[in-house]
Amino acid sequence: MSAQLGRRLRRGATSGAVVAAAVAALAASQAPDTTPPAADNAGGDRAIGAGDTATPPSDGSATGDSPYYTDLPTLNTPNKPGAPTNLPVITGPAEAGIPASVLAAYKRAEASIRSTDPGCNLPWQLLAGIGKVESGQARGGRVDANGTTPSPILGPALNGVGFANISDTDDGAYDGDAIHDRAVGPMQFIPSTWATWGQDANGDGKKDPNNIYDAAQAAGLYLCANERNLAVKADLDRAILSYNRSTEYLNTVLSWFEYYKRGSHQIPDGTGVLPVDRSDNRGRGNRPTPTPPLSPLPTTPAPTTPAPQPGTPKPKPSEPGVPPTTPPPTAPPTTPPTTPPTTPPTTPPTVPPAVKVSRLSTVATGPLTATTGNAFAKAPTVAALDASGAPVKGVSIRFEIGGTTGTRFAGGTTTATVITGSTGLAASPALRAGDKAGTFTVRATVVGVTLPAAEFTATVTAREADTLARVDGEALTATTGGGFAQQLQVKATDKGVFAPGVLVTATVVTSKTEPKESTEGPYFKGEAGTTARTLVLETDTDGLVTLAPDSLLAGDKAGTYYLQLTAPGGGTTFVELTVTAPTPTPEPSTPEPTPSGTDSPETTASPSPSA
């Protein structure tokens, strides 16, 4: 711990006295215990060392492994072990204080996700720990009444110099950088991750990574992904490492997590304390300048010269080092300083009581249809209305998917909670169809109130192809008892574009004009020796369906047959199958026997002319 303490001290706190005081305070257990990282990793590679116990996730990270703040909790914690946890609400800079809007966002995200995914056991203190490390609680809580930062919080360009190299994925829409991505907002999402996990948690109709309510909700969902249970230490570690793949980051977030679990309190927006350095030791341009300034380190007041006492001989001015004989001027009486009135905390958006809602009304959005594996163009939308029919803002609406088509919301869940906006409307997250065709329902209910659900019926259809065409023209021939040795390949297109994932049905028929499944002739060999004259194939990523050689057998009756291929969407084609009987092998000829008593032609003498 002492090895890393000096690196984590604030800039300027380098004197021996300050370091000694800090070490003494730490030894007195006035700071949360932390586990030293396996490696400094300040160079920014963010790789987990071979000796580390934490295993990083195989996929990317929410932040792109961008630099992060690593200022640990103040050594002089107001919440010492064993002290009461019911801390008073105070104002002014304090490490244990969390700005009002930021704290409200963390707690709202916890409540929302616990209602939709109780098995995750998300604690708001984990969001607070990540928010402290990533952005100093949204620059010390400088957000407007809607929870949005006045200017974007941006990390450095992820250009591969010391950390990840991530080319631009959003055309600069979120981070203003059209060359490389940057981590954005209080929870430092990279744009590509925000595109998947972004949320509209404050009901303003926008998914804004610079809004603390939207960012906290998205971070909570991200941490709960892959069915994690954050009450289990291994899952907790995996979740934090999925955010930024560094053991140092894991330990720093865990230290703040434990710190906030021991106690915290609300402070006004804009009065939080910012960390003073980043873990990568890069320039100050990568972080916001704190306003108001950080509290200075305690200093010893300069000694003052006491006023001469009566009867004390005055020192001569000619003596070296003797203070002046003139007594210091008497300061005029001063009025005790007046403490300015404390600005009350900014009130975050509040959720109106759900009991105001009298009914949920479905909003017509058109048919809810999609083909397998694709996104739905529209989302189920409801209106929360009171008894007079007026819209109710800020109500939590829970959407739930039923059925067996495999359809999911963005993020892979079957449930989602959305807060109604100013018009009382709430639309579910985007739907993506599963791999099975069929119908399913989406139910919308008001969280915490028993009211009839609003239901939507949606349909998943198979992918379509309006055209099927054979790629090669080689005739398919075989003899009875054998197999077709030629490969058959057919291309599926829909509106002129290759159609992947289309189910193509191949059937052996005897006529193109009246195509009915044949009862004899060619057939497909199925499992366990079974035979069939119909087979379903699926086009590959290039829209091609391939029938391998000898996968179609000729059967035992010669003749002309057809393989009919059809696809949803109208695509149809016929391929001629010719089955011939084997050519008979000729038997060898034998000489006819000679009649008994008759000479053979070779020994019979020609009659004489005179006979």
Image: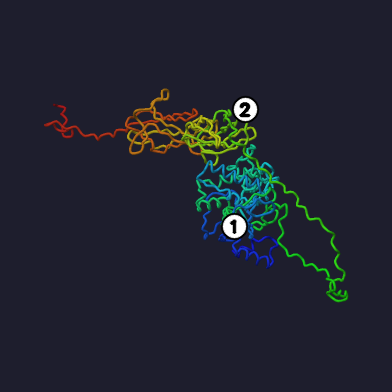
- Which amino acid type is shown beneath numbered disc 2? Ser
Count the marks.
2
Counting from the top left corner in percent of width and height, residue 89 is at 65, 50
Numbered disc in front, either 1 or 2: 1
> Picture coordinates of residue 535 (x, y %)?
40, 33
User: What is the number of the mark on residue 73?
Assistant: none
Mark sitting on residue 388? 2
Give the farthest residue toward the front: 311
Disc 2 packing (10 Å; few <14; some 14–19; many ≥20): few
**Residue 504's x, y, as percent?**
45, 33
Left or right: residue 426 versus residue 521 is right
Give the residue displayed 72% in from the left and 47% down from the top: 343
Left or right: 228, with 103 as reference point: left
Q: Are marks 1 and 2 in contact (CB under 8 Å)?
A: no
Q: Residue tagged by mark 1? A: 83
Name the residue type under label 1.
Ala
